Image: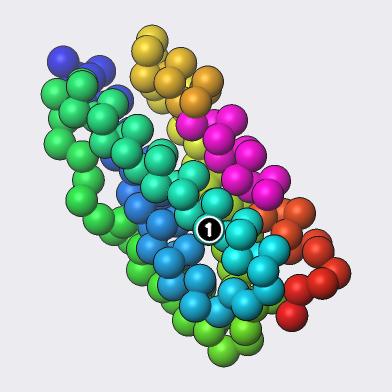
Amino acid sequence: MAQAAAEIETLNSFLRGEISAVETYRLATKHIETPVAKTEVEACLQDHEARVASLKERIEKLGGSPASGSGVWGIFAKVVQAGADLMGEKRAIDALEEGEDHGLADYNRDVDKLHGEARTFVRQQLLPAQKQTHSRLSRLKHNPNLH
């Protein structure tokens, strides 16, 4: 039982990070003007929303209660995004990529705290999806046509 509780807590930590990402992307969208950037940012937002849903489902399957908010990471996201608000699209994308770096680091750092199906779920579904979102934002950040 202790292992299940520890796994639920690790998955909830990932969930709080994903909720924070969704909140940050929603805040950032008001600063995204370039059509290609809008398309990419909206796709990344949808990717994070899908991971929120997957994590909630997995936590419930393990008998846990999914986190309902982003906790500390949500506060961090709002502070970072507040700085981006002052600088426009390019800074907003920089802030999003910073968040993607953080999310990828969290998954890589904590995946081995999980065992069995939960570890497989993160390694085969969440981590590859996070890497894809991170790559998409990195490419966007380096696009010379952004404002």
Check disc 1 and report the residue beneath it: 42
Residue 136 lies left or right of residue 129; in this view the side is: right
On whether residue 131 falls in the magenta region, the answer is yes
> Looking at the picture, does residue 68 appear above or below residue 142?
above
State the image coordinates of residue 115 (x, y, percent, origin top left): 38, 14
Drawn side of residue 80 relative to residue 39, left or right? left
Residue at image position (69%, 63%) is 36
Residue 47 at x, y percent in the picture = 49, 45
Q: Is residue 99 toward the left or the right of residue 140 in the image? A: left
Q: Residue at x 20, y 21 (%)?
A: 62
2 relative to 96 in the view: left or right: left
Q: Residue at x 35, y 53 (%)?
A: 19
Image quadrant of residue 121?
Answer: top left
View extreme (bottom): residue: 86
Pick the quarter of the image with the N terminus: top left
Q: Quadrant of the C terminus?
A: bottom right
Could you say whether the residue bearing mark 1 is in a helix, strand or loop? helix
Q: Count the labels in the image.
A: 1
* The one of 12 and 109 positioned closer to us in this rendering: 12
Predominant SS of the magenta segment: helix
Residue 108, horizontal then vertical, whole percent: 56, 34
Location of residue 72 (image quadrant)? bottom left
- Identify residue type, mark 1: Glu
The reply to whether residue 92 is visible in this rendering is yes
* Magenta-highlighted residues: 126-136
Type of colouring? rainbow
Confirm whether the magenta stretch covers residue 80.
no
Q: Pick out the residue farthest to the right.
A: 144
Q: Residue at x 61, y 51 (%)?
A: 101
| Residue 109 in sight here | no
Query: Which residue is more in the foreground, 74 or 137?
Result: 137
